[in-house]
Every structure is written in structure tokens, then in C-alpha cells.
Image (cartoon, grey):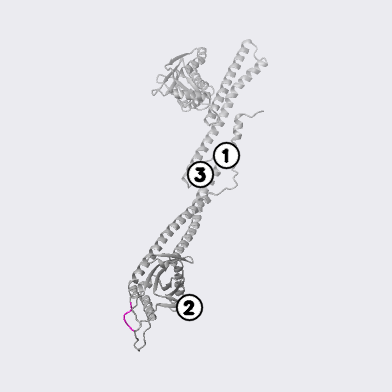
């Protein structure tokens, strides 16, 4: 036994659970986003701060060096000029004088560190004259280290320009000034005690070698370690702030996502209840606007499902009742024929006619039930009604031929007024014929003498109107509100499916159906279907129907 297509489709749509091994809570998603944002912000701020601080350090060091260099002008004048005539013109006295000048130059010493040294380019030997170990051992060692790096990189050759050194990771900004000593001391100068004054030789002995001391250099330098230490402290503070922000972000993520998680779990439980058939609406406050809207939609869905469930149960109950009635008649008359209850030929003929009539009624009911079920499936997307281009005039001729026999048999007349030509609609011919036939059947049942059938275009020319009216008593007030509902019947109604099916078919064709009582008496039904106007649309729909 093969499965039906609908059963196969239903199995293919069977819900399955997500088999993903990793399921991350929504709070962690928020937390991860916040961490990434914090890290990016800290990284960008750190780069920005470092760029600003580095420019500031460079500008600040240059500014301080400028002040220090400007303050050496008087010092340079005193250093390069001859000491005024006195009896103390020894080299030691000159150096003492120079040292005193350096020490007493507040602007120079406050703005930058200084080192006075001599250097012999021939031997590559240098001597730091200031600072000395007597003044400060650490200061003297630092100065010797700086001067050694300056001489090694030949920085002494570039005068009056800021240069940099990297000593043990510390950036040193420095400038070099050169001074040349000029003296007029002569050999026959005599001290006050009568002894001759030795001429200044401007040389000294370093490691057993005599070094020319005529060229004096002044190195003015600034160690930027304190600035970079401050920048490192700022970076550390920024990292600490980022870590604190991450902790706070974690707490806030939990606080902010808890209502969202709670609402999601609430809706999830509601969905599980719907799956089990419990259609009670979800109640309570839902924080998120989107989830609140989802809750409202799910409540509407539950209401529609409950309404559909009630309609379905009512449909089956009414269908069972409507099917049982003709079946009981058929069974009763068939058993009567079997057991010879009807003795005369006329009674047997009447019984057979009843069986035939009830069979036809039963067949029509089943056919209508199948059609309306097909419309329901089409509306839910589980069935596609086959459609094509239809000539409206041909449909009118077909329906008239189909119902003419019933009118003749009932001794009623049908009045036709077809005022439309060369007009096409897109639809299913059998369904449209059934829709019109059900309306004709209803009007024929209640009319006194005749039923009028009109077909015309509306005022806009975009729709075709099929108008079917009778000259009967009209639609009762208590019936009119529920006229197109399933199993809603008037006083002489059969099974209450025909008009409901007519409405379903009209809506399937993007149309509508309307019923009202005419002023002169009788009921009138109007079925409106959209028109195909352009050849391009006709061609496209022809291609679709062919494919």
C-alpha cells in the first residue's frame, strides 16, 4: 500500500530538534559583544593616548632643551673668553670657574642634565669634567654613560640640534654645544711671589696619554623615562579600568538579559502547550517589545487555532449528521425493497426514486465537502489549485447549459443578461462553475417564478461581476449574518455547504461574494473576480499553465 502525497509531505515536515553540540545562552552573546566593544575602545584609546603623549614628550623635551640652550649664552661667553688678568690663570682655576658657572646656572640645571667634557678625536679618548664623582657618583656615572654613547654614535659632530639615544630602553633627548678656549697667557708672566706662571697647555693625561683639551663640549640632555613611566601608568590604569568595565558588563549583562531570558522561556513553555493542544493564552508582563509582540501574535495564533479546532469539530459533527440523514433513507428504502415491504409496483418505484435522489444528494454533499476541503488546503499552502486563462462568455454559456435542466424540471425560468465580451479571468473552470451552480441552486430553491443571471464589468473595468438574483422572499434577517458560514441553513436549506463553498472559491480567485435583499424583493448574489487586461499577462499565465 503506497502512501498518499499529503502523508509524505506531512512526514517530511515533522519537527526535529536542533542537534547543535554548542548552545550558547543569550546572556553570553551580550557579554561577548560587550567585551569586544570594551577591548576595541580601550585599544583605540590607548593608541590615541600613546600618540598624543609621545608628541607631548618630544615637544616638552625640545622646549626644555631650548630653554637650557638659551641659558648657556652667558656661560658660553665666560667659557670662550679669556679670564681677566689675574694671578690665578691656571687650568685648574679655569675649570673651577667653569664648574662654578654651571652649578650656579639655575635655568640650565633645572631644565636639563648637563655634562661638560673634552674629547680628542685622534685618540678617541674623552674626559668628563662635570659632573664629578665628588658632586654625585650616580650623576657622574650616568653622565659618563651618556657621553660614551654620544661619542660612539658621533653625536658630538651635530651641534645645536636635538638628537636621541636609546640607553637600556630609555629615550634620551640631547643637544651638543662646542666651546674653544682662547688664552693670552705668556711664558714670562710672574706670580706675586716672584715665581713664573706656567703657560696653560690645555692638555691633560688620560691613561698615560696626553690629550688636547682645547675643544670643550657641553652635552645638555633629558631622560624621558619619567614621561614614559607616566604613560605606562596611564596604560595600566586604562587596562585596570577595562577589567573593571568587563566585570561590570558581566553583571549588567545578567541583569539586562534575565527579563529577556525569562520572557523567552515563558513563550517557549506557551509554544509547548500549544503543541500539546492547550490553547489557553499566555498571560503576564513581557519586558521586551519584540517578545511582547511575539506573545500577542502567539495569543492570536492560539485563538485562531482554537477557533479552527472548534470549527473543525463542528464541521465533522454537522458533516456526520448530514451524511447520516441520506444514508439512513437509502438504508431504510433498500431494506424495504429487500424484505418485500413495498408490495405494489408504484411503491417500489417510489422507493427506488428516493434512493436515487438521496444518493444524488449524498454525492453532491461529498463532492462539496471535498471541494471546500481543497480550498482550505489551498489557503494554508498545502495544495495548489490549477488555473488557466478563461473566457468569461464561455463560462456563462457553460453554467446556463448546466442548470437549464433543473429550471425546466422545476417549471421555473431563467433570465439571462450577458453584456460582456472578449474578457478573460485567471482561474479554475470547474471550481468557478461549481461556485455559480451552488448560487443558482440556492436561488432556484427559493424563487417564485424566475432567476435572473447577469454578467458585466464593474465601473473600473478591472473586475467581472456575476449577478444571480431571484424573486423569492429574500434572505431572512437571522440567517443573513451567518449566510456564508458552513452548515448555516435557511428554512428550506439542504446541508449548508453550498454558499460556504462559493465564498471559498471566490476568495481563492482573489475575488469576493456579497448577498443582499433587493428593494423589489428577492435575494441577490454578486460574485466579483479580477479581470486579465493585458496581453503580456495573458502570455505569462499561458506559459505558467503550460509549464
Q: Nearer the viewer, mark 1 or mark 2?
A: 2
- Residue at x 56%, y 22% (from the top left corner): 367
Q: Residue at x 56, y 27 (%)?
A: 318
> Which element is circle 3 on?
loop
The image shows a total of numbered marks equal to 3
The residue wearing badge 2 is 208
Query: Which residue is at 32% across, 83% downward?
Result: 86
Residue linked to disc 3: 283
On screen, residue 320 versus residue 450, left or right, reads right
Magenta stretch holds residue 98: no
Instruction: Tell us which disc is closer to us: 3 or 2.
Output: 2
Q: Which type of secondary structure does the marked residue at label 1 adopt? A: helix
| Image side of residue 177 versus residue 8, left or right | left
Q: What's the magenta region? A: 82-87
User: Residue 42, how many percent across, how many down?
Assistant: 46, 56
Q: Residues within 10 Å of mark 2 (few under 14, many from 20)?
A: few
Query: Rounded to the nearest whole Å, what is the CA distance between mark 3 and mark 2?
Result: 102 Å
The answer to whether 90 is drawn above or below residue 398 in the figure is: below
Q: Residue 473's x, y, as percent?
A: 45, 19
Among the 4 quarters of the image, the one containing residue 528: top left
Amino acid at each position: 500500500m503506497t502512501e498518499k502525497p499529503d502523508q509524505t509531505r506531512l512526514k517530511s515536515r515533522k519537527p526535529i530538534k536542533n542537534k547543535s553540540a554548542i548552545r550558547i545562552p543569550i546572556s553570553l552573546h551580550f557579554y561577548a559583544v560587550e567585551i569586544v566593544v570594551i577591548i576595541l575602545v580601550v585599544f583605540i584609546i590607548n593608541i590615541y593616548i600613546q600618540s598624543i603623549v609621545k608628541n607631548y614628550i618630544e615637544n616638552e623635551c625640545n622646549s626644555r632643551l631650548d630653554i637650557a640652550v638659551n641659558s648657556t649664552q652667558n656661560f658660553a661667553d665666560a667659557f670662550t673668553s679669556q679670564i681677566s688678568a689675574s694671578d690665578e690663570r691656571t687650568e685648574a682655576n679655569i675649570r673651577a670657574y667653569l664648574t662654578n658657572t654651571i652649578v650656579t646656572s639655575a635655568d640650565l640645571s633645572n631644565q636639563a642634565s648637563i655634562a661638560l667634557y673634552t674629547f680628542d678625536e685622534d685618540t678617541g679618548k674623552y674626559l668628563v669634567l662635570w659632573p664629578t664623582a665628588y658632586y654625585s657618583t650616580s650623576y657622574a656615572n650616568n653622565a659618563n654613560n651618556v657621553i660614551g654613547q654620544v661619542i660612539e654614535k658621533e653625536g658630538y659632530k651635530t651641534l645645536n640640534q636635538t638628537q636621541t639615544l636609546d640607553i637600556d630602553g630609555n629615550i634620551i633627548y640631547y643637544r651638543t654645544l662646542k666651546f674653544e678656549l682662547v688664552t693670552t697667557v705668556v711664558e714670562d708672566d710672574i706670580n706675586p711671589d716672584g715665581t713664573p706662571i706656567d703657560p696653560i697647555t690645555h692638555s691633560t693625561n688620560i691613561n698615560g696619554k696626553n690629550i688636547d683639551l682645547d675643544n670643550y663640549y657641553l652635552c645638555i640632555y633629558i631622560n624621558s623615562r619619567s614621561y614614559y613611566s607616566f604613560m605606562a601608568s596611564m596604560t595600566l590604569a586604562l587596562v585596570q579600568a577595562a577589567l573593571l568595565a568587563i566585570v561590570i558588563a558581566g553583571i549588567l549583562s545578567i541583569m539586562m538579559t534575565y527579563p529577556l531570558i525569562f520572557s523567552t522561556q515563558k513563550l517557549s513553555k506557551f509554544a509547548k502547550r500549544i503543541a500539546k493542544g492547550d490553547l489557553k493564552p499566555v498571560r503576564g508582563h513581557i519586558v521586551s517589545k519584540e517578545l511582547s509582540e511575539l506573545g500577542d501574535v502567539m495569543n492570536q495564533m492560539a485563538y485562531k487555532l482554537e477557533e479552527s479546532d472548534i470549527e473543525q469539530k463542528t464541521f465533522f459533527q454537522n458533516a456526520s449528521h448530514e451524511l447520516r440523514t441520506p444514508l439512513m433513507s437509502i438504508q431504510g428504502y433498500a431494506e424495504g425493497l429487500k424484505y418485500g415491504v413495498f408490495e405494489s409496483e408504484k411503491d417500489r418505484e417510489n422507493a427506488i426514486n428516493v434512493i436515487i435522489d438521496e444518493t444524488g444528494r449524498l454525492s453532491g454533499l461529498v463532492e462539496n465537502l471535498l471541494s471546500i476541503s481543497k480550498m482550505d488546503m489551498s489557503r494554508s499552502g498545502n495544495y495548489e489549485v490549477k488555473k488557466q486563462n478563461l473566457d468569461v462568455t464561455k463560462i456563462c454559456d457553460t453554467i446556463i447549459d448546466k442548470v437549464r435542466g433543473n429550471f425546466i424540471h422545476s417549471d421555473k425560468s431563467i433570465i439571462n443578461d450577458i453584456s460582456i465580451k472578449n474578457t478573460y479571468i485567471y482561474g479554475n473552470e470547474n471550481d468557478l462553475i461549481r461556485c455559480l451552480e451552488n448560487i443558482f441552486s440556492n436561488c432556484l430553491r427559493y424563487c417564485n417564478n424566475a432567476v435572473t443571471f447577469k454578467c458585466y464589468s464593474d465601473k473600473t473595468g478591472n473586475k467581472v461581476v456575476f449577478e444571480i438574483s431571484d424573486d423569492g422572499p429574500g434572505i431572512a434577517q437571522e440567517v443573513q449574518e451567518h449566510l456564508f458560514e458552513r452548515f448555516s441553513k435557511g428554512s428550506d436549506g439542504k446541508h449548508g455547504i453550498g454558499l460556504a463553498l462559493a465564498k471559498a472559491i471566490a476568495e481563492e480567485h482573489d475575488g469576493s461574494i456579497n448577498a443582499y435583499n433587493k428593494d423589489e424583493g428577492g435575494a441577490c448574489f454578486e460574485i466579483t473576480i479580477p479581470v486579465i487586461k493585458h496581453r503580456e499577462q495573458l502570455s505569462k499565465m499561458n506559459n505558467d499553465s503550460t509549464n
